[in-house]
Amino acid sequence: MYRLTIHTHFAAAHNLVNYQGDCENLHGHNWKVEVTVKARELDCAGLGIDFKILKKKTNEVLDLLDHKYINEVPPFDTLSPSSENLSRFLFEKLAEVLNTDNVSVDEVMVWESEYACASYTAD
């Protein structure tokens, strides 16, 4: 099994719901996002998936959140936009556009700061 990973980012504002502390107030992050996919086989060029395609599809999904108030973007209008929930949301959206017979999303990591991240996998 091959694993391929890209790093990208988005900027947005949010506030945590049902949280007792500063993060319940409106604030923003420059989130770093790592997306890892698995590929069973390589194509004739020796690629599992072209990094350009992986990054393009990822950035198209991130456009749903980039420079937005995330609490107004479904499903975060009813779900707290924590890094944990963001990682699952991105995983599921990316799986819709990337998964094929050969390629599947393996993990999405969402870094809200240089020192803190959450990830989601299907396992």
Image (cartoon, rainbow, N blue to C red):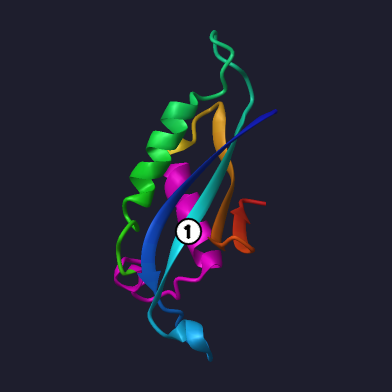
Q: Residue at x 50, y 71 (%)?
A: 82
Given residues 21 and 71, the one toward you in this image is: 21
Given residues 26 and 46, the one toward you in this image is: 26
Q: Residue at x 41, y 85 (%)?
A: 25
Numbered range of the magenta stretch: 70-96
Q: Residue at x 45, y 76 (%)?
A: 80
Residue 98: image quadrant is top left
Q: Does 80 appear in magenta?
A: yes
Marker count (numbered): 1
Q: Does 12 appear in magenta?
A: no
Label 1: state its secondary structure: strand
Packing grade of label 1 (10 A; few <14, some 14-19, many >=20) is many
Q: Is residue 65 above or below residue 70?
A: above
Residue 7, image x, y percentages: 53, 43
Residue 14, image x, y percentages: 39, 73
Q: Is residue 18 above or below residue 52?
A: below
The residue that label 1 is drawn on is: 31
